[in-house]
Image (cartoon, rainbow, N blue to C red):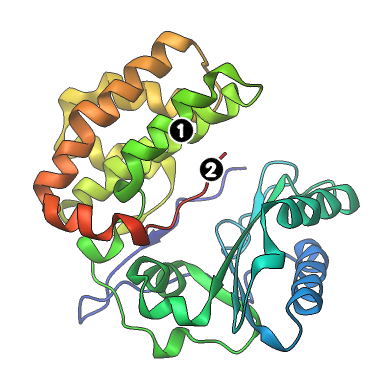
């Protein structure tokens, strides 16, 4: 039975309230999370600060063999040892030991980077729960609908360019689905103020966007089918990529300010397929 969409609503003061919580995490997923936390503590030593979980696991909606573990590791010191090969090895080990875990996506960040990355602060404040270590979220600024919560739109052209580049590699299919999810969530970010809420649920993203832009239904329906693996044709991918760079991203720039997009793009939080 599918889970209901997770919708984050503003409180009486207009600040979006998170739904991620330790209590929501399903019991079976705690063992791999404990292993990730222990491995990160060991790798960081005294520099370990905290580990945060976000996404379906933090919402209690993880699905066996479909859901990833999305984590953010905060460290006090140098994180050169936590490079992508190290993170890939950790993910492979977790998936072998707990086959119901589809993948592990671990984003390392320094505590000092919280002063430079507004988007990382927003991600921690609205979508994450502290699983281990000292929780910083109580000290982070609360967030409102709109510019505060534009995550995917910042890097959309770069993400589309990467997905295009990966079409000649074994990751082509995964890159198409990843790009489609980026387009769906970016399209919602464009209309979130009209929607009056925040969500990352793909179905809800599509529905909210189409209430404002019903003429774009062919593109959004194709993105939804591609994201869910119902279709995978190259012409559909190419059309969506053109839509993302030719219509959607310019609309995001027009709505939120092109100068803001340019200035803040370097602080975007994103993940490659």
Residue at 46% in and 72% down: 124
Q: Dot 2: few (<14), some (14–19), or many (≥20) neighbours within 10 Å?
A: few
Query: Residue 272: which numbered mark, if any?
Result: 2
Q: Is residue 21 visible?
A: no
Quarter placement of the C terminus: top right
User: 243 left or right of 234?
Assistant: left
Q: CA distance from mark 1 to mark 2?
A: 8 Å
Locate residue 206, reporting x and y percent.
33, 37
Q: Position of residue 195 (x, y in %)?
A: 21, 52
Horizontal side of residue 220 vs 170, given as left or right:
left
- Residue under label 1, please give it: 162
Residue at x 16%, y 37% (from the top left corner): 250
Q: Quadrant of the N terminus?
A: top right
Label 2 element class: loop
Q: Give residue 116's quadrant in the image.
A: bottom left
In the rendered image, is residue 187 in sight?
yes
> Looking at the image, is 120 positioned above or below residue 189?
below
């Amino acid at each position: 039975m599918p889970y209901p969409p997770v919708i984050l609503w503003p409180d009486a003061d207009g600040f979006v309230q998170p739904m991620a919580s330790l209590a929501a995490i399903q019991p079976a997923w705690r063992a791999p999370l404990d292993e990730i936390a222990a491995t990160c503590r060991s790798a960081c030593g005294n520099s370990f600060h905290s580990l945060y979980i976000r996404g379906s696991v933090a919402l209690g909606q993880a699905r066996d063999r479909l859901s990833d573990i999305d984590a953010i590791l905060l460290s006090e010191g140098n994180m050169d040892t936590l490079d992508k090969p190290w993170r890939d090895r950790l993910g492979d080990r977790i998936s072998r030991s707990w086959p119901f875990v589809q993948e592990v996506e671990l984003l390392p960040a320094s505590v000092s980077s919280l002063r430079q990355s507004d988007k990382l602060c927003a991600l921690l404040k609205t979508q994450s729960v502290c699983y281990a270590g000292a929780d910083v979220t109580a000290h982070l600024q609360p967030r409102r609908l709109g510019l505060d919560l534009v995550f995917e739109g910042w890097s959309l052209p770069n993400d589309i360019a990467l997905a295009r580049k990966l079409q000649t590699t074994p990751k082509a299919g995964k890159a198409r689905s990843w790009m489609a999810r980026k387009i769906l969530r970016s399209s919602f970010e464009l209309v979130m103020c009209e929607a009056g809420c925040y969500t990352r649920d793909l179905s809800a993203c599509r529905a909210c966007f189409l209430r404002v832009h019903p003429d774009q239904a062919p593109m959004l329906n194709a993105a939804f089918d591609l994201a869910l693996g119902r279709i995978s044709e190259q012409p559909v991918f190419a059309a969506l990529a053109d839509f993302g760079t030719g219509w959607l991203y310019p609309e995001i720039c027009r709505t939120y300010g092109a100068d803001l997009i340019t200035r803040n793009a370097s602080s975007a939080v994103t993940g490659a397929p």
